[in-house]
Amino acid sequence: MSQRSGIGYDSHRLVEGRPLILGGVEIPDAPRGLAGHSDADVLTHAVIDALLGAAGLGDIGQHFPDTDERWRDADSLELLRTACDKLRDAGHNPINVDATVACEEPKLGPFRDEMRTRLAQAAGLEASAVNVKFTTGERMGFVGRGEGMAALAIATVA
Ligand SMILES: [Zn+2]
């Protein structure tokens, strides 16, 4: 069976008064969180777009429009679970995911394994098939100035 790959990219603004949720993990004591219609989990959104892309199923906005009240403050891991159901319905199985989160602060390394585990569970994968990396903006651009965060992902499906 042939394998296909897809990419995903997402960004969200950092604001006060919102929890910071990445890869389904709420980062404790984060001074600011990501703004968005759902829980604004930028990492999970990039992963969803990569998987949908690999399967040729469009993008996250088509499947979970931000004009739909159903997705207000939605748990993005639930969106990932639903997206993977759609993939399987279309005859595709996720193989692996690799992702990078661009974030100036806080330090996210201590939460890497929990993010991998949660993303993998939602996608029906082993944690070893989901890699999560972190980088900063080196104080450049919107990431470096702490205005927001971005995430990139690539996924392979068979
Ligand atoms: Zn998003």
Image: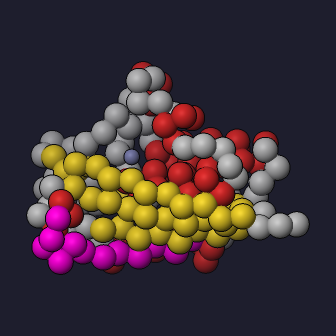
Name the image quarter holding residue 39: top left
Is residue 119 toward the left or the right of residue 82 in the image? Answer: left
Q: Quadrant of the C terminus?
A: bottom right
Q: Is residue 26 left or right of residue 70?
A: left
Q: What x and y, as percent, mark residue 6?
A: 60, 61
Tally the marks: 0
Q: Nearer the viewer, residue 54 or 96?
A: 54
Q: Is residue 19 visible?
A: no
Residue 34 sits above or below residue 138 on the image:
above
Specify whether 10 is left or right of 143: right
Q: How is the image coloured?
A: secondary structure
Identify which residue, 35 or 140, lies in the foreground.
Answer: 140
Is 120 placed above or below 36 here?
below
Q: Is residue 131 magenta?
A: yes
Q: Position of residue 124 (x, y in %)?
A: 68, 58
* Residue 100, horizontal then vertical, whole percent: 41, 70
- The residue nearer to you, when weighing 19 against 54, is 54
Q: Which residues are magenta?
A: 130-141
Residue 103: quarter of image:
bottom left
Q: Can you name the residue that lies furthest to the right here?
A: 1
User: Going 15% across and 42% down the picture, which residue do you hit?
Assistant: 17
Residue 148, quarter of the rendered image: bottom left
Residue ID at (43%, 64%): 152
Placement of 72 over or under 127, stated as above or below: above
Q: Is residue 50 above or below residue 63?
A: below
Depth check: give the residue in front, 152 or 88: 152
Identify which residue is drawn at 21% across, 44% down: 18
Question: Residue 121's spot in the image, x, y percent?
Answer: 60, 59
Residue at the image position 27 percent from the left and 53 percent from the top: 20
- Whether residue 60 is visible: yes
Quadrant of the rendering where the N terminus is positioned? bottom right
